[in-house]
Amino acid sequence: MRPSRLARFHGLFLAAVGCCGGLAVGCAESARYVDLDSKPTGAVIYVDGVRRGLTRSRVELDFESGPNARVLIQIVKPRYKPVLQYWTPGEVPENEKKVFVLEAE
């Protein structure tokens, strides 16, 4: 007895939803949010070379899965030394907030 077209479509649909759900869970585990601030405020935030706004912002950090998962955080303000840090998922601040104290040039 052959399943109807509707039954086959339904089965494929459920399989696709299951796969997408699994991917979404995997992605959710690799994304973290952190509040970034600086003293003085108003520095530009870059994550992996992409501008994400100014300090005093909540920023999403997307980590690729695997043992080498990390992101590059850059805090840049004119007349101050730039701050560059690589973070792994385990190095994201526990309270999800980080204040960078900038040093004048």
Image: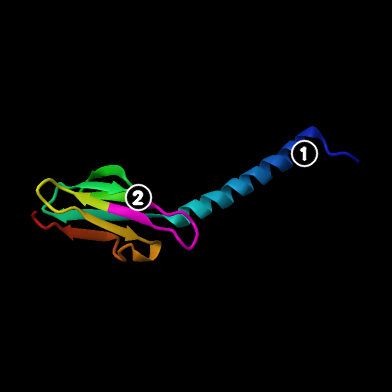
Q: Is residue 88 left or right of residue 98?
A: right
Position of residue 6 in the picture relative to residue 64 (left or right)? right
* Residue located beneath label 2 in the image: 60
Q: Where on the picture, by quarter, is residue 9?
A: top right
Residue placed farthest to the front in the image? 105
Report the residue marked by disc 1: 7
Q: Residue at x 65, y 43 (%)?
A: 16
Query: Magenta stretch mostly in which secondary structure?
Result: loop
**Amino acid found under the numbered disc labelled 1:** Ala
| Residue at (55% x, 50% y) in the render | 23
Type of amino acid under label 2: Glu
**Magenta includes 64?**
yes
Q: Residue at x 52, y 53 (%)?
A: 25
Q: Position of residue 99 (x, y in %)?
A: 19, 59
Residue 38, by quadrant, is bottom left
Magenta span: 61-73
How far apart, in angstroms, are the residues tagged by discs 1 and 2? 41 Å
Of marks 1 and 2, the one in the foreground = 2
Q: In the image, is residue 5 above or below residue 83?
A: above
Query: Is 79 included in the stretch rendered in magenta?
Result: no
